[in-house]
Image (tube, rainbow, N blue to C red):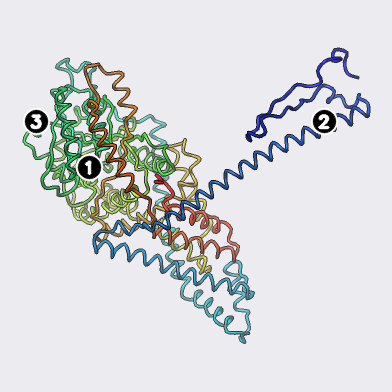
Amino acid sequence: MAPWWAKGSHKGTSLVVKMENPNWSMVELEAPSEEDFLIGSTPTGSREKIRGKNAKQLTWVLLLKAHRAAGCLTSITSTFLSFGSTVRRRVASGRTDDNDIETDENKAVKTGFYNCIKVFLWLSLLLFCFEIAAYFKGWHFGAPNLQLQYILSVPVGFKDLFDWLYTHWVLIRVAYLAPPLQFLANVCIVLFLIQSMDRLILCLGCFWIRLKKIKPIPKHEAVADLESGEDSFFPMVLIQIPMCNEKEVYQQSIAAVCSLDWPKSRILIQVLDDSDDPMTQLLIKEEVHKWQQEGAHIVYRHRVLRDGYKAGNLKSAMSCSYVEDYEFVAIFDADFQPSPDFLKRTVPHFKDNEDLGLVQTRWSFVNKDDNLLTRLQNINLSFHFEVEQQVNGVFINFFGFNGTAGVWRIKALEESGGWLERTTVEDMDIAVRAHLRGWKFIFLNDVECQCELPESYEAYRKQQHRWHSGPMQLFRLCLPDIIRAKISVWKKFNMIFLFFLLRKLILPFYSFTLFCIILPMTMFVPEAELPAWVVCYIPATMSFLNILPAPKSFPFIVPYLLFENTMSVTKFNAMVSGLFQLGSSYEWVVTKKFGRSSEGDLVSLVEKGPKHQRVGSEPNLDEIQADLKQEQKTRKTKHNRIYTKELALAFLLLTASARSLLSAQGIHFYFLLFQGISFLLVGLDLIGEQVL
C-alpha cells in the first residue's frame, strides 16, 4: 500500500525532451512515481500497468537515440559527399606541384626524386598482384621462420609454372633481398634510437630547468621612467624590419615597433623594403611617412639591386654610416609584433655581460587554432622553443638564431663577419660563426613575440624546404671552420654531430627511409622484419614527449605523429638538395601571410595608449578599396594543388597495408593504413587552408 500522504497526488513529474528534428518538437514522458518503487506492495493489475508504462518510456528513449544516430549518420554522409566532391574537383582541375618548378635544373631534381618513388609504387603493385595470386593458390604464410620451413618442405616436382615461379621468388628474396634490406633497416633503427635518446635527454633537461626554476636574470633592470636618469640603462638600439611584398602585414609590424617603450632619442627603426611591386612600395612609404609625422624615428630603405634575399637586405642596411652610433640591433620579420616592453625585457641582459652576443625570444602564434595544419605546427614549434632552444641556451649558451624576434650586439655581428649571402639560412649562419668566435647566447622563454603561422600546405611546404636545405648547405661550408676553431672538443662535437648531423640530417633521413620505404618493402619481403616497438611504441612515446610543451594539443597526438612522417618527404628532399647543392636548395620563397597576427594587440594599444598617439595609420578609403580589389583578384587566382610525391607514397603505403593483411601483421597494417591516409589527405591538399 502506498503511504497516506501520497493519495491524491500526481503520479509522476513531467519530463520534456527536445528533439533535433523539427518535425518532432517535444515529447512528454512521465518520470517514475513512488508506486514504481513499491512493486511488492501493489496488486497484480497495477504491476502490469507499471510494466506497460515503463515499456512505453523505454520505447521513446530508444526512438530518441535512434533519431540522434540517424542525424549523426546523415552528418557523416554529407561530410563524405562533400569530401568526395572536393577530391573530384581537385583532380579535375589538374593543378599539381609541377607548376612550382621554374628552372630546368630544379625540374630534373624534383622529377628524379618523384620517379624513384613511382618505381617503388609500381613494384609494390606488381608484387601485390603476385602475392594475391599466390594466396589463392594456397601459399599462406605467417611468421618468416614458418614461411621458410614451409617452402623447404615443398616437393621438387611442381604442379604448374606459377608454383615454380613463386618458389624461386621466395628463395631469391630470402637469399638476396632480405639481408641488405634488413641491414638498412637495422642502421635506421640505430639512428632512430640515437635520435630518440637525444630527444629524451632534451626533455629531461627541460624538466630540470622547470624543477629548479632556472631562467636568465638581467644584472640591471630598465627603470620604468624612460626620461629619468643617469642610472638608467637605455643604450642606442637599431631596429630592422626586413620585408618583401608583404602588404598584408606591413602596417601592423610598423605600428607595433613604433609603439615600443624606449626613449625616442635612443632608437631608430629601419624599414627594409625589398618589394618589387610598385604599389606595395608606395603603401609602405606612406606608412613610414605617417609615423615620421607622429614623431617616430623611422626611415624607409629600398634596394635597387635585390641580391642575396634577406641576408643581402640586412647586409645593405648595416652598411649605413649612422649604424656605428648604435650598440644593439633588434630584428623583426614583417609578421612579428613585439609587445611594448620587448626591449626593456631583453636589452638589460647585455648589461655587464660583455660575452653575450644574442638574446633570442620565443614566438607565439595568434592563428594556432585556425585549422589542423596550424595546430600541428604549434606542437612542433612549441617543442623547438621550450625544449630545444631553452635547454641549449641554459646548458651550452648556443642555439640557432631564429632570424627574428632577437637582439644582437652589433660588435658580435661585425666580429663574426656580418651577414653573408651564401645560404638561405643566414640566421643560422651568423649564429654558428658567432659561436665559433666565443660569443654566448641567451634564450628567454618567458618573453614572447606574436607572429603568424602559414595556413596553407603550399606555404608551409616551401618554408620547410628552405629550413631543411639551408642547414645542409651551411654544414658543407662551415665544417672546415668548425674543425679549425679554437673551441673545446665538446663544443665541436655538439655542433657537428648534434646540431647538424643528428637534428638536421639524420632525422629526415631515417624518418623517410624507415617509415616510407623500408616498412612497406618489408611487407613484400617479409623475411626482413621491423619490430612492433619500432613501428608503434617508440614513435608514440616520442610524440608524447613532443606534445608536452603544448598540453592543450594532446587530442592531436596521433595526427601529429602521422603528419610528421608525411612531412619527412619534403624534409628528405630538401636535405638531399642542400647536402649536394642541387638547384632547389637555393630557392627562397617568402612565406605567405594574412595579417592576422596582431589585430587584438593593436586594438588594445589603441585603447590603452594616449589619444594623440596613433597605433596605425589613418584609414584611407581609396587605399582600402584598392586593397579589396587586389585581394579579390588574389583570391580568384589562388587554388589548392595536388602533390604528386605525397600521392604516390599514399598508394604505396596503402598497397603495403593491403599486403600485410595476407600475412596477418596487425600493428603494421594499422600503421600503414593510417599513414597512407595521411599521405592521401596531404597529397590532395586537404589539410590547411581550403580555397573553394
Of residues 244 and 482, which is closer to you in this image?
A: 244
* Image disc number at residue 324: none
Residue 69, image x and y in percent? 65, 41
Q: Amino acid at mark 2?
A: Lys
Cα separation, mark 2 vs mark 3, equals 90 Å
In x, y percent, where is residue 127?
Answer: 51, 71
How packed mark 2 is, by other alpha carbons closer than 10 Å (few <14, some 14-19, many 20 or more), is: some
Q: Looking at the image, which is closer to me, 681 or 169?
A: 681
Residue 72 x, y percent position in the rendering: 61, 42
Circle on res. 53 = 2
Say what amino acid the circle numbered 1 marks: Asn
Position of residue 251 relative to residue 522, above or below, is: above
* The N terminus: image quadrant: top right
Q: Residues within 10 Å of mark 3 (few under 14, many from 20)?
A: few
Q: Can residue 414 be seen in the rendering of this structure?
A: no
* Residue at left offset 10%, top offset 34%: 323
Q: Is residue 414 left or right of residue 657?
A: left
Q: List the single residue furthest toward the bottom.
A: 157
Q: Return the mark for residue 245.
A: 1
Q: Earlier in the sequence, mark 2 or mark 3?
A: 2
The residue carrying mark 3 is: 325
Q: Amino acid at mark 3?
A: Asp
- Residue 292: in sight, yes or no? yes
Is label 1 in contact with label 2 (beta carbons under 8 Å)? no
Badge 3 marks a residue whose secondary structure is helix
Q: Secondary structure at mark 2?
A: helix
